[in-house]
Amino acid sequence: MKKTIATLLSVLLIMSVFTSTAVFAQETTETEQVIDIGALDADTVPDADSYTIVDDGEPLLEVTRVKELGVTAALEETASEYYTADFVLPDNGYQVYLTGLTKNNVDEIRQAIIAEYTNGKDFNLKNLGFIDAEKTWADDGDENMCWAASTANLLTYTGWAAQAGFGSTDDLFEALIKGFADEAGNIENATSWFLNGSIASGGANKIPGTGGYLPQYSYTDLVEAFDLYNNCAEKLETVYDRLHSGYGASLSVNIFDISGNMSGHAITLWGFVTDPRYPKTSEEFYKNILITDSDSDKYAVRDGKDRRDADDVMSLFALEAFHQNEISTYRFSISRSQTALLSEAKTVVPFSDAVPHETSSDATMDPSRYPDIVLDPFVLSDNDKDDKTLTTFLPNTDIYYQPHMMNVGGADYFGKLSLSVKVTDPQDNVVYEKDFLYHQDVTVNALKGVMFNKESINLPVGDYVITASFNMDHSTTEAYYFNNTRSIRFKVRDQYRIGDADGNGIFDSSDVTKMQRVLAKLDTIDEMYDKRCDIDGNGTVSITDATLALRYLARLDIKYPIDEIRICD
C-alpha cells in the first residue's frame, strides 16, 4: 500500500525554509562549496548555505538553503519553520517536490542521503515530526472526521493554528472533535468553524458555543475547492503551484472495494513526483503523490494510548490516469482490494498580514445570523462565452468582465444591489468606470447568488487593475464588509512569433532571407526583430539563429521554440 521514499531522495536536493506564515522566499547568494564524497561521512554535514557533493567530479547531491523574507506569525513562540525538498531522480529524471518538513527531519533526511551514497543504507520517512493528525482505533468520536484531521494539518502548516494559540496539529484536531458531531464533513465547514464559529453548507453539525478563534476572517478568502473528476491534470497545475507558494492542500478521494462499494476520505497532500518533460497541465506530468493520512496508524492508538503517540508517516502513491464516461482523473491503489479516485482538492492560504480581513466596527462578524455578500467569482475573459478568468490580453481585444455576488451568510439580504466597477492604471488614474444597479429592495436567498451582465472594455498596451465594489457605505448591515471589494490585476500586451523576422505574422523561407540580409547588413530591422529572431535565446541574433531557422524549415529535429507565439513582457 505504501512505498518507502528511500529510492526517491537523490542527486539534487534544494531545501527552502520559511516560517509557517511566510508566502515568498528568496535565495542566498553565498559561494557554493564543492566537497568530494570521500572526505565526508554520514555524520558530517556541511554548514554552508550551498554546497555540492561530488564523486570523481560527478555531482551526487546539490543543496541550497532558501531563507524566508521575515514574515512571521504574531505568536512567535508558537510559529514554526518548515522546509521543502526539491530534487531529481537519477534513473528517470523525475522531479520530486515535498513540503511540510521541519528543521530536524530535513537534517535527518539530508544525512540519510549521504549515508545511502557512502554506506548503501536505506531509510524510511517515518516518525520524523511530519504534520500528521491521527485518529484513534477505539470509538472516541473521531471515526468519521478525516476531514477535520486534514483541516488541522493544513491550518497548522499554514500558520493559522499558531495565530489562534494552538501548539500542535493534535491540539487543534481535538478541538475540532469537540466542536462537531462525528459525521462526514468538509474543510470549508471546519475552517469556517475555526475562524468564527459558524459553518458553511452541508456536512457535520457543529456543537454550539465552540470555535470562533479568529472572527475577523472569512473562510471564503482562505479555502478554494477544485473538482478533480473533470480535467484533473489541469486543476492540479494550480494545486502544484500553490504548494510551492506555501499553501496547504488536501485531497478528497472516493475509495472503491472489489465489490464496487464506495466511501469518501480526506488526506493531506504534501508533494508530487512529476515528469518535467511534459507541461504541468498534461496527464503525463503527475506520477505520484506524497500524503499523510489520519488512518495511517490509528490502529496503534488503543489501550489508553494518546493520538500523539501514533507514528507520523509520509506515504507515496503512484498515480494512474483514469477515464470513464465524463470522469477524467487519477486513481491509485491503496491495497489489493481498494482503489482510490481523486475527486476534489482544497487549498488553504498561508497566514500573512496581507490576507484580507475585517477592520470595520460596523461589521457584526457573525455570518450565522447576518447576511454576508461576497464578490466571487469575478470573471475577466476575452470571450463572452468563457467563465475562466484571464490576466493577459492582446491590444484591440474586447475584455469581458462579470462580477458575481453570493450571500454566504445565514440570513437573507435586503437592500440595494448596487455595484461600482472601475479600471485604474499604475498611476491610479481611472481609465474606465461604470455603475450598476441590479434591483431595488431585492432579497438574496442564502443559497443563491446574483450575476450581473457581462460588459466589455478595450484598452491599449499597459498594466491595469479592475475593481468591483459593493455596499461601501455600509447602508445594509453585513457580517463582513472587507469582502465587498474584489480586484484583478491584468495586462494588455502585444504578441510575436519566434522566427518571424519580417514581422508579417507567419514563419517561412522569407524570414530566413530577412535574417541573412540583416546579418550581411543589407537590410534594416524594427524594434521587435531581436525578440522574434533570437531563436537560441542567448540574447543576440547571429548566424546560429539563421541556421536553426533553416533546419526547422528542412524539418530537421531541433529543440527550439520556432513558430511559437509569445507575449511581450
Image: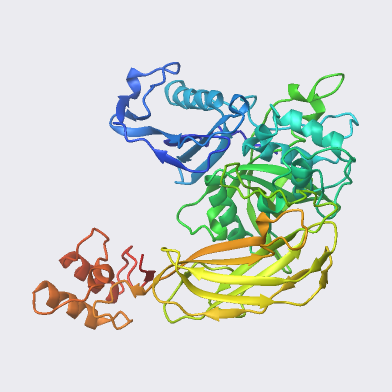
Q: Judge from the rendering whether residue 165 lies leftward or rightward of residue 88; answer left or right.
A: right
Residue at 44%, 68% (x, y): give it. 429
Q: Is 182 on the left or on the right of 94, as rendered?
A: right
When asked about the image quadrant of residue 303, the answer is top right
Residue appearing at x 60%, y 29% in the figure: 79
Q: Is residue 494 above or below residue 372?
A: below
Give residue 310's quadrant in the image.
Answer: top right
Residue furthest to the left:
521
Q: Is residue 320 visible?
A: yes
Quarter of the picture containing the C terminus is: bottom left
Question: Is residue 335 in view?
Answer: no
- Measured from the top left, where is residue 274 in percent x and y? 52, 49
Q: On the picture, is 547 further left or further right than 127?
A: left
Q: Residue 174 sits in which quadrant?
A: top right
Q: Could you say where residue 545 lies in the image, as x and y percent from the top left?
A: 21, 67
In this rendering, is residue 116 above or below 331?
above
In the picture, measured across the screen, residue 541 lies left or right of residue 415, that is left
Give the answer, above or below, for where 103 lies relative to 247.
above
Q: How is the image coloured?
A: rainbow
Residue 334: percent from the left, percent from the top?
Answer: 73, 43
The percent position of residue 395, horizontal first and vertical second, equals 41, 78
Where's the N terminus, which quadrant? top right
Please tell me which residue is depicted at 73% across the width and 32% down the height of the picture: 133
Looking at the picture, tell me which residue is in the foreground, 117 or 456: 456
For the image, the number of numbered tags is: 0
